[in-house]
Image (cartoon, coloured by chain):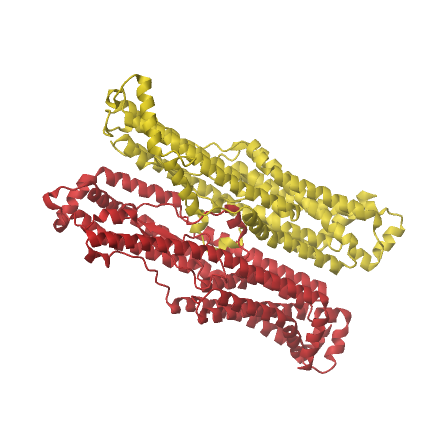
Amino acid sequence: MILPIARKEFLDAWRDGRFRWAAAIMVALLGVALLLAWQQVGRTRAERAAAATIERENWLNQGEKNSHSAGHFGVYVFKPLPPLAVFDRGLEPFVGTTVFLEAHRQNQAAFLPAQDATAMRRFGELTAATGLQLLAPLLIVLLTFGALAGERERGTLRQVLSLGVRPRDLVLGKALGLGVALAVLLLPVALFGAVALAKLPGGDAAGGWIRLAWLGGAYALYLAAILAGCLAVSAVAPTARAALATLLVCWAANAVLAPRLASDLAQRVLPTPKLVEFETAMNKAVQEGLDGHNPRNDRLQAFAQETLKKHGKTRIEELPFNFNGLVMLESERMANEVFDHHFGKLWDRLEAQDRTVTWTGLVAPLLGLRSASMALAGTDFTQHRHFSVAAEQHRRDFVRVLNEDMMNNTDGGHHGGTAGRALWEKLPAFRYDPPPPAHALRAATPGLMVLLLWAAGAWAALLLVAPRLKPN
Amino acid sequence: MTLFKLEFRLLARERAAWIVLALFAAALGYGIWNGGRVAGRQREAATALTRSSEEFLGQVKQALGQQAIDPKAVAGRGTMAVLPPAPLPLLATGQSDLSPGHESVVLWRLAASGDTRSELENPSHLLAGRFDLAFVLVWLFPLFLLALTYDLMAGDRESGTLRLALAQGISPWRWMARRALARSLPMLVLAALATLAAGFFSGPGGGGLRVVLALAVVLAYGLFWVALAVAVNVVARSAASAATSLGAAWVLLVLVAPTLLNVTVETLHPTPSRPELVAAGRKASGEAEERGGELLNSFYRDHPELAPPGQQADFAAQHLTVQTEVGRAVEPVRQKFDEQLARQQAAVGQWRFVSPAIAAHEALTDLAGTGYWRHRAFREQVNDFKKTVSDFYTPKIHLRQTLTLADYERLPRFDFREESTAAWLNRTGTGLAGMLAFAGVLSAWAWQRMRPAKLGALAS
C-alpha cells in the first residue's frame, strides 16, 4: 500500500505551484552558488600558488648573507584552499592564509580573508552548503506541513483511513513520496558538484571522492531527519496552520538562533584566552622555562658545560665547530617545547569549543551538520590546525638547517661567515599535504553521531505517532 | 480611535501575543547584554594598551630628565596606535571583533605587513556571528513583527467577515492602518526602548545625535515590514498564504539578498590577493636589501644634510633607507589593493538598497562606530602615523642625534580623529531615506488598492 501513496504524494508535490516556485528558486541559488564558488576557489588557489612561487624566488635570490640573517629574513608560506571549499567554505574566510616562518618565533597564520571583505560577509555566505543547511529545510517545511494536518482539516484523512489503509502505511508512503520529490530535486545539484570538483585541478587529491560521498551521507541524514520530524509534527498538529507555525518557529530556532547561542555557550563554558595573556605567558615561558623556575641563561650555561665535558675540552674556542650555532639549535629546541605546549593548549581549547557547539547539535541538528560538513570539506578548525602544524614543522626544519650550517661551516666564536644560494637551495620549498580522509572522518564523527541520533529519533517519533493518527 | 483601542484590547487578550512580546523583549535584553560584554572586553583592552603606552612615555620623560637618550631605544619599543572604544558599541558589534583595534608602530617595521589580529577569536564564532542588538533588530525584529501582523485582513477575507466589516462604511485604508498600528505598536516601542537603552548603557561617548538616528533607522525598518504586511494582506487569499508570503519575503530579504549581494560584489570586484601583496613586498625588500649600501650612498647624495659625521653609516641608518625603498616599491601594489577594496565597499554602498535588511545593518553598524568606515579611518590614520614616526626619528638616526627633554613634547603620539559628523550623517541619512522610500512605495501601492472604488475587488 505504501507505493501508491508515495506515488500520489510525489505527483501532488510536483503539481503544487508553490513547491515548484520554491524548488526552482532553491535549485537556481544552489547552481549559482556552486558556479561562483568554483570560479572563486579556482582563482584563490591560483593566486596563492603564484604567491608561493614568487616567495620561493625571493628566498633563493636573497643574496649572500649570514645564515642566521637568513633565518630572520624568513619565509612566508600560504595556505592552499581545499578543493571542496567549492561546496562549503566553512571557516576559510575566518582563518589566516599566510604564515611567516622565522627564527626564534612561532607565528600564527595571519591575514583573514574576511578582514579584507565587506561587512556583507557577516550575513553569511551563499554556498551550496548553506543553501542545503538553511533553505532545503524550509522547502521541506513547505512540502510537509499540510501533508497530514491538511488532510485532517479537509476531512480526507477520515476517508482514507476508512478505506482500511493502515495509518503507518499512509505516513510512510507520504514520507517516501516527498523524500523522492526532494531527491529528484537535489541529485542533479550533487552531480553538478561532483563534476565541478573533478574539473578543479587537484580536485581529487586528499580523497576528494571519499569526502564527497560522506558529505552526501551527512546531508541525506540531516534532510531525512527533518523530513520525518516535520511529518511527525504535521501528524499531531490540530490544523495545518498550527503545524506551519510550529515548524517555522523550529526552523528559525535551528537556523538563525542556534549557531549564535551555541557559540556564546561554548565561549562561556570554555573561554578563549586573551591574546595579551597568551603571548605574555608564552614569552615568559621561553625566558624562564615551562615550569618558570629554570631561567634560559642557566640552562644554556649548563648546556655549555655539558658540551665541553662531552668533547673533553675546557674552553669553548677549542670545540671543533662554531659553538654559537649549537647554542642556536639548543635554544630553538627549548623554545619549541614552549610553543608546542602553549599553542597546543590554545588549539585544544578552540577544538573543545567547537566540540561543545557540535554536541549542542542534539538540540539543533544544524550544528551537527555544520560541523560534519566543514570537517569533510576540509574547511574546519582541525584541518587548519593540521596546516599550522605542517607550516611550523617546516619552520623548524628550515631554522635547523641554517643553524647547522652556522655550526659546521663558520668560524667559532662569532656569528660571522656568509652563505649563498647553495645553502638556500638546500631548503626544500614548502609543500603542504592535506590530511587524509580518515582525519576528516574522525573530525566529522561527533557531527555525524549527532545527525544519526536526530535521524533515528525523528523516524522513531514518526513511527510512534503514525499508528495513533487521529482522523479529526 | 475606538477602532485602534478595540484592536489593542483584542491583542492584549491574546496569550500568544504576550508570549511573542516577552520573547522579543528577552532577545533584546540578551542582545544588549551580550554586546555589552564584547564592548567591555574591547574597552578593557584599549585602556590597558593606552595605559602601558603612557607608562612607557612617563619612563622616557624621567630618563630624559636625567640625560639625553638614543632615539633608537624609544623608536624600537614602538608606539601603540589604539582605536578608542566605539561611540555606541552596544548597538552593534559589527566588524570590531574582526578588524584590528590597535597596532604597534615600530620604526624598524614600518614597511612590514605583520599580523593583523588584535584578539584571539575562535573562527567558528566569527562565522556564526554575534547575538548582539543589531542581530535582534535586523533579523528577529521583522519575524516577531510579522508574527503579530501577518493577518491584518486576509483572515477576515477568508472567513467572510471582511465584507461585513467593510459594509460598516469605514474606509478600508483607515481600518487597515489602525489595525496595523495597534498590532505593531508594542513591538515598535520595545525596539525603540532597546535602542535607547543601548545608547544609555554605551556611556557618554555616544552623543545624542547617533542615538536619535539609530532610533529613526529602527523605526523606519519596522515600518517597512509593517507596510509589507499591509501590502501582502491586500492581496492574500487566506491567513496561511499571507503568512507564507511574508515568511518567504523575510527569507529572501534577510537571508538570501545579503549573501547574493556578497557573491555578486565578490565576482564583479574580486577581493585582491593578500598573499600576492605579501610576496610583492618581500620581493621589493629582498632587492632593496641587496642594494642596501648603494641605496644609502645615493640617499646621502640626495640628502647631504642628513649624512652623519664622517659619512660612516651605521646599521640602523641602512635599514631605514632600505625600508623607505621597500615602501616606495610596494606602494603601487598596495594602492591597487586598497582601491579594489574601496570599489567593493562602494558597490555594497550602492546596492545596499536591494534589501532594507542590508541598509539597516549598514546604518546601525555605522552609527555604532563598529562598522567598515570607522575601522577604515583607523587604518588610514595609522598609515599616516607611520609617516609621522618616520619623519620624526629618521633624521635623528642618520645624524646620530640624541633625544633631549625638549623633544619629549614632540614625540609622535597617535590620536584617533573621529570622522566628521557630516560624513556619517550623510551615509546613514541616505540609508534611512532608502528604507523610508521602501516603506512609502509599499504603503502607496496598498493605499491605491484600498481606494473605495476598488472595494469590491478588495472584499472578495
Q: Which chain is red?
A: B
Image coordinates of residue B194 in percent, x first then y, are 55, 66
Image coordinates of residue B153 in percent, x first then y, are 70, 71
Q: Quadrant of the C terminus of chain B?
A: bottom right
One can see residue B453 in this view: no
- Rendered view: B237 above or below A192: below
User: Left or right: B252 with respect to A105?
Assistant: right
Q: Residue at x 78, y 52 (%)?
A: A235
User: Left or right: A156 with respect to B207?
Assistant: right
Image coordinates of residue B305 in percent, x first then y, are 12, 51
Total residue callouts: 0
Q: Colour of chain A?
A: yellow
- Rendered view: B288 above or below B212: above
Q: Residue at x 34, y 26 (%)?
A: A303
Q: Nearer the viewer, residue B292 or A201?
A: B292
- Rendered view: B229 above or below A412: below
One can see residue B36 in this view: yes
Task: Please identify the quarter of the rendering in which residue B233 is found.
Answer: bottom right
Residue farthest to the left? Answer: B310
Q: Nearer the viewer, residue A73 or A323?
A: A323
Q: Residue at x 66, y 48 (%)?
A: A363
Residue farthest to the front? Answer: A293
User: Left or right: B92 with respect to B332?
Assistant: right
Q: Quadrant of the N terminus of chain B?
A: bottom right
Image coordinates of residue B297 in percent, x first then y, are 15, 43
Q: Nearer the viewer, residue B141 or B286?
A: B141
Task: Please identify the quarter of the rendering in which residue B382 is found.
Answer: bottom left
Q: Nearer the viewer, residue A66 or A220?
A: A66
User: Left or right: A422 with respect to B118?
Assistant: left
Residue farthest to the top? Answer: A312
